[in-house]
């Protein structure tokens, strides 16, 4: 089984701060990690390989430093890693990003299953995974919490929905986006870390891919960010005092005065 | 102190540290209380290749040796000296095969051990402790087989391990020269286990009796030659004693670290107790003594890996010194914590219980001093 896992380099949100003037993330000096949902994607790929044999390839689109997260993936045990990096890719929105990743997956060759995290913790759009599937004309299921069954022809998964799950069967090749309930990502292993220190990660530019250059990067991105704002919170709070009984009485009076009761 | 670790050694240490902090730390009290074997942690250690660091690369190991085993043991022991022992005792069980196994035995067993199959080493008996030559377990020759009878006592990883090195007497008249080392697999008919011991410390590590009742073992499972059992045992222990030293200095460092946090938080007489000279000087001594222990343990491990021929004195010194320091440091740590230190809600009483065994096993510190003294007049 040939599996491709798409991963994204994101700032470690435990350390990240917001620039209050521009309302954007301060990325400088913040450690980069594999997007946590993508860790579950890698784990799913590795578990399927352990069960069925085959190969797990990890791809990421980003600046040269995104090589770090690809090396982290190698240290977890993936077979190959490819970085898509080119100035022409810069400024891509989810449409251009998913198109570029899809064209890279086509170049990789025969792929049975593409796995993405459900969304990246920096952008939170959850659009790139399904976007890749559309570009590749693969069936897809998002929010996968369990892979129930997989064979050479098809995959059956549980998709998490509000009050339970949907059981979905798709023909392969297919794409899934996964959530954290799917599995417990593993620790790196020594042979993987040693390999990651030595391996050269191949870098593919726009010229390496067979794609429509008008559909990539900023030019291929219909999304225009006009401004970013933090919602203002100016709610006035009233604090009740007195004994618990008095406080409850006061609360009830206030709720009926505001006609909530 | 700068220990000049190379890049791979740093990677090994850092990964062991991460496993200890993220996987072991939340479960330490639970395992101390239940005394169950920590299979979930051992599984993580195996998948992360930690059992490969002391196995030759030819048989599935990664570049390493005794020193790398020491680094892993120390990191794990900072968090739990009991769970870490399950790892280090497996290294002890593996060592006789690395040192004395023939090609066939190495090819059969070492790759499994590299994958994390647990091993154990069985020398001690009820009447053969410090006097290790007084072994009562016998192995009587019967054609191509030997028939083992007797009981081994206090065997770490007993019942959990798959592969055992067992020292038994093939010729009692010859005394120590009549002992032979056998590889015995779990499941071999006539080989069973006694009850699990209820111990003071290192409770997350399993200790059991091994019972041999007409247990037939093929002669191909003899390590080295008949009569070499005592040599196999002594040479093995010489190499693994730095592992006990590492366990001791890990436990002591864990206690020092706990004290550094506690003394900054705990206030008496209107200030943090880390401001009091009496506390500061106690901690200075603890840190200084443990650093000296670390130097001795690391250097001995490196000597062994470098192929130096004679190291039984250094091996005895590093185990004895580091374990005495660990006992002193953990006792002082309980003192610094005061009444809280005596309570199970706080980490240091367990460290004191765990430290005690390091002065006793793999040769009591009294025996180590005998070994050290016996080398002093040698030219």
Image: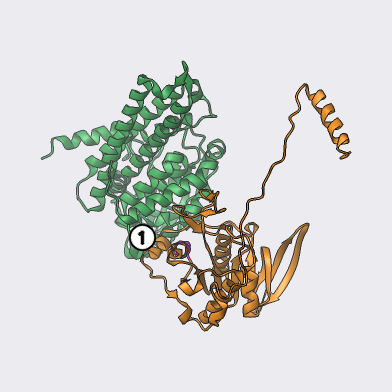
Name of the residue lying farthest toward the top: B269
Is there any visible trace of residue B1 in the rendered image? Answer: yes
x and y percent of residue A25 in the render?
Answer: 53, 54
Front one among A89 and B233: A89
Using the image as rendered, state which of residue B369 and residue B62 is in the foreground. B62
Please provide percent x and percent y for residue B213: 48, 48
What count of labels does the image hold?
1
Q: In terms of depth relative to the viewer, which is nearer, A60 or B198?
A: A60
- Image quadrant for the N terminus of chain A? bottom right
Q: Colour of chain B?
A: green
Residue B342 shown left or right of residue A153 in the figure:
left
Magenta span of residues = A72-77
Above or below A63: residue B71: above
Mark 1: secondary structure = loop
The tint chain A carries is orange
Is A8 rendered above or below residue B131? below
* Viewer can see residue B151: no
Residue A43 shown left or right of residue A238 in the figure? left
What residue is at 33 percent from the left and 37 percent from the top? Answer: B363
| Residue B264, horizontal then vertical, whole percent | 44, 28
- Read off the chain for label 1: B
Q: Position of residue B99 (x, y in %)?
A: 30, 55
The residue that disc 1 covers is B62
- Main SS, magenta region, reads helix
């Amino acid at each position: 089984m040939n599996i491709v896992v798409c991963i994204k380099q994101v700032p470690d949100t435990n350390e990240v701060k917001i620039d209050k003037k521009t309302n954007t993330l301060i990325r400088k000096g913040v450690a980069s990690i594999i997007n946590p949902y993508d860790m579950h994607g890698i784990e799913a790929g590795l578990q399927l390989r352990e069960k069925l044999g085959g190969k797990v390839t990890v791809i990421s689109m980003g600046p040269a430093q995104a090589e770090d997260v690809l090396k982290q993936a190698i240290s977890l045990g993936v077979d190959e890693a490819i970085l898509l990096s080119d100035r022409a890719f810069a400024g891509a929105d989810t449409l251009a990003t998913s198109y570029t990743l899809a064209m890279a997956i086509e170049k990789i060759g025969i792929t049975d299953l593409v796995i993405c995290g459900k969304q990246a913790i920096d952008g939170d759009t959850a659009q790139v995974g399904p976007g890749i599937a559309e570009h590749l004309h693969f069936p897809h299921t998002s929010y996968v919490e369990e892979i129930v069954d997989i064979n050479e022809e098809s995959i059956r998964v549980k998709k998490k929905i509000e009050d339970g799950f949907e059981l979905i069967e798709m023909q392969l090749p297919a794409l899934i986006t996964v959530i954290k309930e799917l599995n417990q990502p593993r620790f790196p292993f020594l042979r993987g870390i040693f390999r990651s220190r030595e391996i050269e990660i191949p870098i593919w530019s726009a010229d390496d891919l067979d794609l429509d250059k008008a559909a990539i990067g900023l030019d291929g991105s219909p999304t225009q960010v006009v401004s970013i704002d933090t919602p203002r919170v100016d709610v006035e709070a009233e604090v009740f005092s007195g004994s618990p009984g008095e406080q409850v009485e006061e609360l009830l009076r206030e709720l009926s005065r505001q006609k909530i009761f | 102190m700068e220990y000049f670790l190379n890049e791979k050694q740093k990677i090994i240490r850092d990964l062991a540290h991460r496993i200890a902090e993220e996987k072991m730390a939340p479960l330490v009290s639970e395992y101390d209380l239940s005394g169950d074997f920590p299979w979930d942690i051992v599984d993580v250690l195996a998948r992360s290749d930690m059992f490969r660091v002391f196995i030759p690369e030819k048989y599935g190991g990664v570049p390493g040796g005794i020193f790398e085993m020491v680094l892993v043991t120390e990191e794990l022991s900072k968090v739990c000296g009991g769970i870490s022992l399950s790892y280090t005792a497996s290294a002890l069980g593996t060592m006789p095969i690395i040192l004395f196994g023939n090609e066939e035995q190495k090819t059969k067993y070492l790759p499994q051990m590299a994958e994390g199959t647990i091993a154990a080493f069985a020398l001690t008996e009820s009447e053969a402790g410090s006097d290790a030559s007084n072994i009562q377990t016998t192995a009587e020759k019967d054609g191509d087989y030997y028939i083992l009878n007797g009981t081994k006592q206090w065997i770490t990883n007993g019942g959990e391990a798959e592969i055992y090195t067992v020292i038994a007497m093939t010729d009692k008249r010859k005394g120590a020269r009549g002992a032979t080392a056998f590889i015995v697999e779990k499941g071999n008919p006539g080989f069973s286990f006694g009850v699990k011991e209820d111990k003071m410390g290192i409770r997350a590590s399993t200790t059991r009796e091994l019972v041999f009742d007409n247990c037939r073992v093929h002669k191909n499972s003899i390590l080295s030659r008949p009569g070499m059992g005592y040599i196999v045992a002594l040479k093995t222990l010489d190499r693994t004693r730095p592992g006990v030293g590492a366990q001791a200095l890990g436990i002591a460092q864990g206690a020092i670290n706990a004290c550094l946090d506690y003394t900054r938080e705990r206030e008496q007489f209107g200030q943090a107790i880390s401001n009091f000279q009496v506390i500061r000087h106690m901690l200075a001594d603890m840190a200084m003594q443990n650093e000296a222990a670390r130097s001795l343990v690391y250097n001995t491990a490196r000597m062994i890996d470098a192929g130096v021929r004679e190291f039984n004195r250094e091996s005895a010194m590093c185990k004895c010194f580091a374990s005495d320091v660990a006992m002193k440091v953990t006792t002082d740590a309980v003192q610094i914590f005061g009444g809280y230190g005596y309570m199970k809600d706080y980490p240091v009483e367990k460290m004191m219980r765990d430290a005690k065994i390091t002065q006793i096993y793999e040769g009591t510190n009294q025996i180590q001093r005998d070994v050290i003294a016996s080398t002093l007049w040698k030219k």
